[in-house]
Image (cartoon, rainbow, N blue to C red):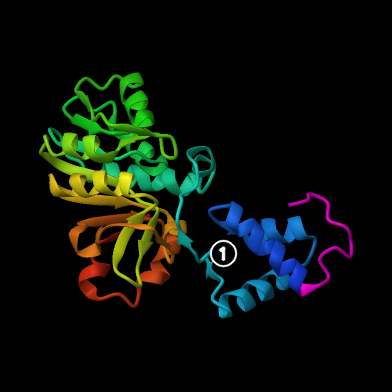
Amino acid sequence: MSEHPSENEFKSSAVRQARLLEQLRIEVFADAQKLKDALGVSIATIRRDLSELEARGLLKRMHGGAAIINQATRDYSTPVREGANTQEKARIGAAAAELVVEGDAVMIDSGTTTLQVAKHLATRQSLTFVTNGADILTELAASGAQDIHLIGGQYIDLNRSLGGPLAAEGVRRFSVDKTILSVTAVDLDRGMIATATPQISSVQQAMIEIARTVIVVADHSKFQRSALSVIAPLQKIDHIVTNEATRPLTRSLPADLRSKFIFV
């Protein structure tokens, strides 16, 4: 999106809303203030546009901005996700790490939010780590973790993981106390977690199978959207650690599902 739009460029609501949706397709989450600055219009105009587009079922308004509603056939690449919602991910990572106790064996899925969990756990010498994530391995090793097991398989550049049938088979050779999962979508309407491809989801399904406790870490941008490949129903998840902006989306859930959420 142009940094300096001309005075008349976005006077047409149709053109302005088309550019707004274009920005949402590029980014994980669009902040209303940034949209205002980029489009050169008032915050009231942005809010009106967001309300109209939400009424048409094209986006979901969230705290401070909006996220596009789409069937995600592919996830955003790691460099894009690394720059999105960084403060929220850091808080989520710290909170999820508190659920791990000394002596645990921990499976850490590949992902930018799970990487934040790994940063908090890496110096705890009593822990045993299993991971399929290249970035997770690098973080654990650099921070001095002593007991690390890497799952082999097909390298998937999208999230810098090892995936596919060989990785799923490798995961099932372990039994762990905690699995910490990263997901593309927490679909509250359908009651499930999902990701971009079967090569990734098959490994995550195995990670759920071999864990006593399953923890999903996901910021607010992962909610009210879906993704191509289903991982599991929410009933199979023990804890979902997310930020406060997600809380309003959970109020209509059954009590047993609401109890799974930890807000930070």
| Residue sitting farthest toward the right | 7
Above or below for 51 versus 62: below
| Residue at disc 1, secondary structure | strand
**Residue 259: percent from left, percent from top:** 23, 66
Residue 263 picture location, percent across and down = 35, 58
Q: Position of residue 90 (x, y in %)?
A: 42, 43
The residue beneath circle 1 is 66
Please tell me which residue is depicted at 89% across the width and 62% down the height of the picture. 7
Q: Quadrant of residue 71?
A: bottom left
Q: Between 194 and 219, which is closer to the camera in this rendering?
A: 194
Find out whether residue 41 is within the magenta segment. no
Q: Quadrant of residue 207?
A: top left
Does 214 sit above or below residue 136? below
- Relative image position of residue 108 (x, y in whole percent): 27, 38
Residue range of the region highlighted in magenta in the rendering: 1-13
Left or right position of 244 against 123: right
Task: Please say whether residue 5 is one of the residues in the magenta stretch.
Answer: yes
* Three-letter residue code for mark 1: Ala
Closer to us: 38 or 90 = 38
